[in-house]
Image (cartoon, rainbow, N blue to C red):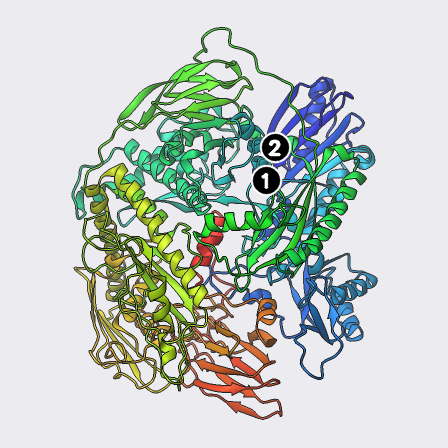
Amino acid sequence: MGSPEGRFHFAIDRGGTFTDVFAQCPGGHVRVLKLLSEDPANYADAPTEGIRRILEQEAGVLLPRDRPLDSSHIASIRMGTTVATNALLERKGERVALLVTRGFRDLLHIGTQARGDLFDLAVPMPEVLYEEVLEVDERVVLHRGEAGTGTPVKGRTGDMLEVQQPVDLGALRGQLEGLLSRGIRSLAVVLMHSYTWAQHEQQVGALARELGFTHVSLSSEAMPMVRRPRGHTACADAYLTPAIQRYVQGFRRGFRGQLKDVQVLFMRSDGGLAPMDAFSGSRAVLSGPAGGVVGYSATTYHQEGGHPVIGFDMGGMRTLGPGSSSDPPALTVFEASTAGITLQAPQLDINTVAAGGGSRLFFRSGLFVVGPESAGAHPGPACYRKGGPVTVTDANLVLGRLLPASFPCIFGPGEDQPLSPEASRKALEAVATEVNSFLTNGPCPASPLSLEEVAMGFVRVANEAMCRPIRALTQARGHDPSAHVLACFGGAGGQHACAIARALGMDTVRIHRHSGLLSALGLALADVVHEAQEPCSLLYMPETFVQLDQRLSRLEEQCVDALQAQGFPRSQISTESFLHLRYQGTDCALMVSAHQHPATARSPRAGDFGAAFVERYRREFGFVIPERPVVVDDVRVRGTGRSGLRLEDAPKAQTGPPRVDKMTQCYFEGGYQETPVYLLGELGYGHKLQGPCLIIDSNSTILVEPGCQAEVTETGDIRISVGAEAPGTVGTQLDPIQLSIFSHRFMSIADGPHPAAHGDCAVPDPAPGCQPPPWRRATEQPSQCRGQPPARPNCYHAGVLAGSDAACVLCGQPRAPCRHWGHHTGLHGAVFLSFKLVQGGVFQEEAVTEALRAPGKVPNCSGTRNLHDNLSDLRAQVAANQKGIQLVGELIGQYGLDVVQAYMGHIQANAELAVRDMLRAFGTSRQAQGLPLEVSSEDHMDDGSPICLSVQINLRQGSAVFDFSGTGPEVFGNLNAPRAITLSALIYCLRCLVGRDIPLNQGCLAPVRVVIPRGSILDPSPEAAVVGGNVLTSQRVVDVILGAFGACAASQGCMNNVTLGNAHVGYYETVAGGAGAGPGWHGRSGVHSHMTNTRITDPEILESRYPVVLRRFELRRGSGGRGRFRGGDGVIRELLFREEALLSVLTERRAFRPYGLHGGEPGARGLNLLIRKNGRTVNLGGKTSVTVYPGDVFCLHTPGGGGYGDPEDPAPPPGSPPLALAFPEHGSVFEYRRAQEAV
């Protein structure tokens, strides 16, 4: 891209608030422009208006807004846009109908069945994008060679398939005509196994187009990858692409000839440009921010000599991993969620964090809290003069780090006033009053803080919140964040860059001279990309290398042909090949390139993908499985046509010392300091500026903190050398600001991605008696999983709590400084009361193997069926502990042992305070209504065992006694629950009742005394069978606690445990049901609730790995209890068996229905049916094991949730109550955390 022909080249980033325009004009000079994205009083379209203004400035003639622009002087327009993102967030896309295989009408609603927020009883979940569903009569299954089946056909993966039922196009025609009559013109078609057998979708698509549907998205074309997110991707494409096409058409109409002879390209989510006719909704959701990633990777990365870079934009992170100096590989993910919709498409790994300038500030129970609630663009921060709340922007304004004079007068009701420091101070003073009230009257009396100290505290906490995902992202991939350069862009990021770099141990910050418009610049620097991908099911081994090379060559040819058709000569086209690899029997596939691994004699000609896979797997997970075959799930080629702009406007050299525009007062640690202000446009190459100082231009403000030095590079950018922070003293006495910072640091260690694929990490207090914090911890002892007699369901899924075998770095005692709770399948009765996994630095593989196989020595019992997986997972847990020890050691090295120990205690005290505040508020509310301070509840297990609870509130102390006296005795079956399970259920409930994010630890139980009768079902003898206590009785404990507090109606109260297996395979799943309704919300349907959040196996994966056909998986309509707010519906799940196997079910709520509250009706009971091949139907009851044979069907009906309120009350407004505006999280860190919360 350049302008030798004397024409303009435009790169435009149309953001949610502002549109940035970067133009290279004839002659090579650059013009930049920023304008509001929405200003209907003055113009209809911001990008068109931006082009008009620049053309007008260059030509020196007036160009009327009401006439199309002459495009003859325009060579190219590149655009990144939030049109798709906004339509998705605001749910303002096209009306869509979903066509899906019969039996799966609710598949996308159920999703993974895991809820997003573990502790929100309302279970807020985004709604689906489609308006109606049509079930298509068709079915394809994988061929397994059963007798009597039809002729198999070969899918494009190489798998053999059976077409059990062709598409009934005749019946479908009438249904499609009905959709058209109701005004629906866009379809998403999602049929089972279409990733490998696309013919049925193609037939449906052809019929729909024949009938007149304007947009038809086939999942096999939108993203031909296995698994359910392919369906979400097709729906997003059908929902968003028409909106994008309308915008593109409207944009074109703003120009004469509708841009016929102009190259118009749009940025995709993967950082590549695509022609506007090929720009689709599912590839557009990160179109805007992707430009920023390209911008800093194409500038900072190269200018820092190929040094790894982390990009930072206020409100979000843009991350670039280590790579070669010639082609920086921006980290890409292939499955991520945006606005609750999981998309299967290549997209840059852009991680967002709720700590932007608009994030609101709170003081809650002794903690400084930043976000996630946001002030939004309207009303915006308090300083916008529209009555908005106090935010991070207000804190920076109070500290003098923002200068109102450098902002345009666009604020206030008339949008004609400057920023208001007075409004910021007034709003922050209200919060400061809360802070100082706590300091003077709280548990550790201290001197009050000044307004500036409060503002500084919030800024420090916001900085730490932004550091946390950066640490998690880099450490998850085996990298050290301190080894990176921080590339800062966006208008607000420069205010925080030095502090964030310091906190991460970085010594360099790079800020491009166009940092406020770097996304637009990135569009100018980007290349055109075409990708080709197809599914595969080959093993990665020498016998398949020829086939893999042939597939890659064919895809490479497609990419080259497509780019040449766009006018690129072959010399400007490069390609890169990828294989999507995973170990057989696992779900963790990695898309790997052989970029740094050239071909060998034992690899495909395209490169040594196997070596690349092993290297990355070891780095990210801490171990490899050398004997395990590797499967190729997908084959992909990315073709790139090099076309980026080369900037020619070199900055001026310095002609003397930099001119100080003005002096101002900025607040830093220790007080106000005289701070010079420089104008970026007046600085030249070689100028050096000592901190503190401010560097401003029309689009951004850069704060150079004390101890740092900024210099202007030869390219005109700002390079800041970050000096060491001035030594400060952090004492052991409670400081609310430090408490908030330590809370983030501890959670970074406990929750950050460690080298273990599944599980949770904990940082225990050095004091005796500490339990791991998350509610799922099921044992107070190091670990135990008590097996079941053969006559009852086995324990297919167990937990192991691994602690380190070294002296504690916190107190020197031989206790584990870090623990990792892992989930293991197929242990089958193995008991580990206490076991040393590592001795003398050596993993005790032989002893562990013997223990895992020991149950097989008992008649009619078996040992582990997954020995290799169990050993690998245990190694990963040990690696996670070692990583935790390292991070705790770094924290001690920074603050000192006594301070870290003290703040561990303060964190527990803070959790205690939050629970006491909740108990006082609950008691005060009851007292105001004239109700007693004692509440009670009782519920039953299906065998009639009562679970009884009485809660006595002490209003003065903010404490309570939870008394389970009256609970039934230990039972003969496996529903007994060790005492720790009840405590785990209680800590979960307390966190839900608090209703906001608090540190989850042992301190939550400090205000509570728990009475559990010894010998009861909740405190059984050591010999009692307990597996059902963890997965079923725990749910009933939650029911009685929440029932006593009247928080919500009962949820399904069951995990619906289903196991099946034979000599070859073993499978275990838990199945969703209905959530209980509550005051102001309907219960969510088809979701896991309370003490479990496991994800369900994808239907296509299930059928490909196990001898079953999933005939039906949909909502059980009407099973939720009636009420003013209705309970959520359960689900119906039908499994057809293709081999003989042992089926075991362990379920509850088959006798006692989930209760309703305040007049709400109970939810429906669950039901377990076995339908034999000959048609005989048997009710299996709640708990049994039975042999099943080919042709038998297991039909599971899960319970619904209870209703809330009298059903005859006036109907409430539809949907759940509006949620506070929060910053939408996105990226691999967010996805990792969701995965950890769903195991």
Locate the C terminus and report the quarter of the image it occupies.
Answer: bottom left
Q: Is residue 612 left or right of residue 1202?
A: right
Q: Is residue 1013 left or right of residue 422?
A: left
Q: Which residue is mark 1?
A: 290
- Residue 338: percent from left, percent from top: 55, 51
Q: At label 1, which amino acid type do we have?
A: Ala
Q: Which residue is mark 2?
A: 522
Q: Is residue 118 visible?
A: no
- Discs 2, 1 touching: Cβ within 8 Å: yes
Q: Is residue 92 visible?
A: yes
Q: At label 2, which amino acid type do we have?
A: Gly
Residue 253 vs 704, above or below: the answer is: below
Q: Is residue 539 left or right of residue 688?
A: right
Residue at image position (45%, 78%) is 1163
- Residue 1170: percent from left, percent from top: 54, 87
Name which quarter of the figure residue 332 lies in: top right
Name which quarter of the figure residue 403 lies in: top left
- Residue 600: percent from left, percent from top: 62, 45
Residue positioned most to the front: 601
